[in-house]
Image (spheres, rainbow, N blue to C red):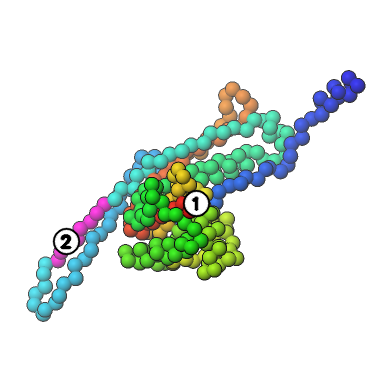
């Protein structure tokens, strides 16, 4: 019996050829921004100057000499690359030898997703902070139920119409529970499909294409900043400036480290919406 027990202690650990899948959030924030100036950045701390021309005055013509040309005003915005995050991980040689999968490739994929999720959350938070169209406050969030969930999105669309925001390309990102409320309203399409990029296929309410994300900014008491608008509202620039594979000095492993930098700037705040909501108790 003692021999049998000892024998069992030498049964080797089996490494699965399948990696456990992750329950990841859909990454959708990049669908709310433009990336017009991304090619102009190279490092953390870079600044891109963005010029915007003022309005041209339209005057009556009487047949007499016209006025001297007006000098147009110009405002200048600064897109600052002031966000930076890095990763640094290793995979031991013994783990690679025993596993029948490429752990380094899988680890790089996880690092890429982790970085993208941080950027996703950051963009949502910045839109919430810079939006000129704000409905509700964290202290007095709009309480939602089946009776008002649909109509309030329609009202948001009217608000943008009154500010001359183009209807084309409007999007609104909702938490999952909001879509649940909408699905109980007979005016809303019931058979919905949420795609991998968070888009709710076929769902247009108040001129907004609806998206779903769990990365929206949250406050205490179940309050959520549901954000949206058009890509004219915010510009975004991102650059992976460093990626380096190396062998750590004090163990037998492969390691990779990388640095990602980005910046975001509200260039047309009137094109952005911050809808501060919570489910009705």
Q: Which dot marks residue 71? A: 2
List the single residue furthest toward the right. 1
Can you identify the residue that label 1 sits on?
281
Who is closer to the viewer here, 212 or 223?
223
Residue at 53%, 65% (x, y): give it.
185
Quarter of the picture containing the N terminus is: top right
Left or right: 45 with respect to 244?
left
Name the front one of labels 1 and 2: 1
Whether 70 is among the magenta residues is yes
Residue at 55%, 41% (x, y): give it.
111
Residue 100, position as x, y percentages in the image: 73, 39
Residue 267, position as x, y percentages in the image: 33, 54
Q: Which residues are magenta?
A: 69-76
Q: Is residue 127 above or below residue 8?
A: below
The mark nearer the N terminus, 1 or 2, is: 2
Tell me if label 1 and label 2 are in contact, CB under 8 Å: no
User: Can residue 130 be seen from the camera position used here?
Assistant: yes
List the single residue furthest toward the front. 281
Q: Residues within 10 Å of mark 1 (few under 14, many from 20)?
A: few
Q: Secondary structure at mark 1?
A: loop
Who is closer to the viewer here, 226 or 244?
226
Residue 47, position as x, y percentages in the image: 33, 45
Whether 145 is among the magenta residues is no
Q: Secondary structure at mark 2?
A: loop
Residue at 43%, 42% (x, y): give it.
261
Left or right: 142 with respect to 181?
left
**Distance between the Cα atoms at labels 1 and 2?**
56 Å
Who is closer to the viewer here, 120 or 145?
145
Magenta stretch secondary structure, dominant: loop
């Amino acid at each position: 019996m003692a021999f049998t027990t000892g024998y069992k202690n030498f049964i080797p650990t089996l490494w699965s050829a399948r990696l456990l899948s992750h329950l990841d959030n859909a990454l959708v924030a990049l669908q709310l921004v433009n990336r017009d100036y991304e090619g102009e950045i190279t490092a953390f701390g870079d600044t891109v100057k963005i010029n915007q021309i003022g309005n041209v005055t339209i005057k009556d013509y009487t047949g007499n000499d016209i006025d001297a040309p007006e000098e147009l005003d110009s405002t200048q915005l600064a897109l600052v690359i002031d966000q930076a995050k890095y990763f640094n991980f290793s995979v031991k040689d013994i783990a690679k030898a025993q596993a029948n999968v490429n752990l380094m490739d899988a680890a790089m994929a996880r690092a890429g997703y982790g970085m993208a999720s941080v950027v996703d959350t950051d963009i949502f938070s910045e839109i919430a902070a810079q939006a000129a169209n704000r409905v509700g406050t964290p202290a007095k969030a709009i309480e939602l139920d089946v009776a008002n969930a649909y109509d309030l999105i329609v009202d948001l669309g009217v608000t943008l119409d009154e500010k001359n925001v183009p209807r084309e390309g409007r999007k609104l990102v909702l938490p999952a529970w909001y879509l649940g409320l909408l699905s109980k309203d007979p005016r809303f399409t019931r058979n919905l499909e949420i795609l991998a990029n968070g888009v709710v296929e076929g769902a247009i309410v108040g001129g907004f294409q609806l998206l779903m994300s769990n990365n929206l900014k949250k406050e205490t008491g179940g309050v959520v900043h549901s954000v949206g608008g058009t890509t004219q509202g915010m510009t975004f620039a991102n650059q992976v400036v460093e990626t380096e594979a190396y062998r750590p000095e004090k163990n037998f492993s492969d390691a990779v480290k990388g640095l990602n930098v980005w910046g975001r700037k509200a260039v047309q705040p009137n094109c952005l919406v911050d809808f501060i909501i919570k489910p009705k108790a």
